[in-house]
Image (cartoon, grey):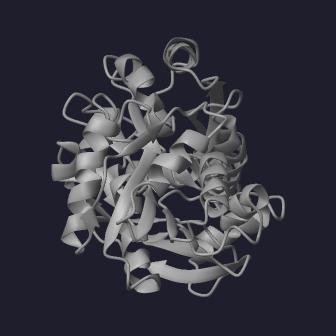
């Protein structure tokens, strides 16, 4: 009888062990599945609005490629993690076609067709065409560049931000570079595109110039963005005889190159300081090497001494010898840093987090969240370091890096 009981007891223990082992295996499998499921990244859709056709595509067609490179850099680094869940960036773009109507149409497609909650772009003064779409839809939008017109970044755009220095930060940078490179310059004449920004931007630029000890002489000389014959503009600038240098606020390389060429043909060899990020090589290509001496821009120089590693990585990942601006790519990088810091995909939460930050890492180095006075809204802009280039005897020379600091 004892042996028979022992056998039954043994069978029960064996059965119990099998059941326990089975439960452990089942629970382990379920845990593995849950872990694997959590490890699978989801998708965060971010829109970009750039002028890929039309006159402004000289900037934005290049920008689009670098926006995609930065998106891949973010994903290669693990994307963004929100509340323990990883997200890879998926970019969806629209063409603003270099017109305000085109920008508005593209903004509508991003808002209603793509249903994005975050957008990078547009660049330049084009934000006035997209803000009326993004704001009522509470889409957090990061402009690549602004010219201080109403409706770009101000109190009327609580969901609008600026991650690049423009236009005030770039002005500060190039003014500091001008002081270093041309110490004898005391008086400057201003030339700028007549894109609607003149009454809003130029008074601020004059104030900055004056704060660095410069006197602005003559009337501001405006020109249409689509202008082809710059002879009248060069003549007006040349007529301002007491100017020691010409200061060009915003505009494109074709504008600067043509004005420099015509000024030199008039015998005007005064320094030409162009606040834009266009490389000096673009100006030389238009004006000619002989005419391009004493030119200074905020152009980027890949692989130059002191360059941040992120900046050079963006360049190395793309085609060599291309133009390089990083207005909107920097906006994408900063936007994802802010989303990560907020630990949320809710634009309202990200907005509040951005407004609470003091510093953020940009592609150009540490940026200061600032711009309260300049833009009339608290902590919606970022000031970051910028380099500059100069032309010496027809050759492009890397000038160095300028610490811009917080935007006023």
Instruction: Note whether 368 is above or below 67 in the view shown.
Output: below
Drawn side of residue 106 relative to residue 177, left or right: right
Number of disc labels: 0
Along the horizontal axis of the image, is 393 left or right of 249? right
268 with respect to 382 (left or right): right
Q: Quadrant of the C terminus?
A: bottom left
Q: In the image shown, does 101 or 121 lie closer to the viewer?
A: 101
Q: Is residue 296 above or below residue 382?
A: below
The image shows residue 52 at horizontal and vertical percentages of 69, 31
Viewer-proximal residue, 305 or 213? 213
Residue at 73% over, 76% down: 394
Q: Does the rendering let one see residue 380?
A: no
- Could you say which quadrant of the image residue 176 lies in? bottom left
Q: Residue at x 71, y 28 (%)?
A: 53
Pick the front one: 289 or 51 = 289
Observer-nearest of 98 and 362: 98
Q: Quadrant of residue 158?
A: top left
Quadrant where the image shows the N terminus: bottom right
Q: Outermost residue, right direction?
A: 320
* Residue 93 image offset from top left, x and y in percent: 64, 29
Q: Is residue 206 above or below residue 399?
A: above
Q: Residue at the spot x=60%, y=24% of the render?
A: 96
Residue 30 image offset from top left, x and y in percent: 62, 44
Would residue 243 be visible to someone looking at this image? yes
- Residue 227 falls left or right of residue 322: left
How far across and how far down the image is residue 377, in percent? 18, 42
Quadrant of residue 319 within the rendered picture: bottom right
């Amino acid at each position: 009888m004892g042996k028979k009981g022992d056998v039954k007891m043994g069978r029960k223990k064996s059965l119990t062990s099998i059941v326990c082992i089975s439960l452990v295996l089942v629970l382990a499998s379920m845990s593995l599945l849950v872990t694997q499921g959590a490890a699978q990244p989801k998708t965060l859709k971010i829109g970009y609005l750039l002028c890929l056709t039309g006159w402004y595509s000289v900037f934005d067609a290049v920008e689009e490629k670098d926006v995609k490179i930065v998106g891949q850099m973010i994903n290669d680094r693990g994307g963004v993690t929100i509340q323990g869940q990883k997200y890879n960036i998926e970019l969806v773009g629209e063409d603003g076609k270099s017109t305000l109507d085109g920008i508005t149409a593209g903004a509508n497609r991003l808002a209603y067709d793509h249903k994005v909650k975050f957008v990078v772009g547009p660049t330049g003064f084009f934000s006035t065409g997209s803000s009326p779409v993004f704001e009522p839809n509470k889409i957090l939008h990061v402009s690549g560049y602004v010219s201080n017109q109403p409706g770009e970044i101000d109190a009327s755009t609580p969901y609008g931000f600026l991650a690049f220095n423009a236009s005030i930060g770039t002005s500060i940078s190039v003014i500091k570079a001008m002081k270093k490179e041309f110490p004898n310059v005391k008086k400057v004449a201003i030339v700028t595109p007549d894109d609607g920004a003149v009454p809003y931007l130029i008074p601020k630029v004059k104030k900055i110039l004056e704060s660095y000890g410069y006197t602005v002489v003559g009337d501001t000389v405006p020109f249409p963005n689509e202008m082809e014959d710059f002879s009248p503009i060069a003549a007006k600038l040349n007529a301002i005889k007491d100017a020691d240098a010409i200061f060009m606020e915003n505009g494109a390389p074709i504008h600067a190159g043509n004005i420099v060429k015509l000024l030199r043909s008039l015998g005007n060899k005064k320094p030409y300081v162009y606040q834009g990020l266009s490389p000096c090589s673009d100006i030389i290509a238009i004006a000619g090497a002989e005419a391009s001496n004493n030119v200074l821009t905020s152009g980027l120089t890949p692989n130059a001494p002191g360059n941040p590693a992120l900046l050079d990585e963006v360049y190395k990942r793309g085609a060599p010898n291309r133009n390089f601006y990083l207005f909107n790519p920097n906006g994408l990088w900063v936007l994802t840093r802010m989303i990560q810091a907020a630990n949320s995909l809710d634009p309202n939460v990200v907005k509040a987090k951005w407004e609470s930050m003091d510093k953020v890492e940009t592609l150009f180095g540490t940026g200061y969240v600032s711009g309260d006075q300049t833009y009339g809204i608290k902590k919606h802009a970022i000031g970051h370091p910028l380099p500059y280039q100069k032309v010496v005897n027809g050759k492009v020379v890397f000038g160095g890096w300028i610490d811009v600091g917080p935007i006023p």
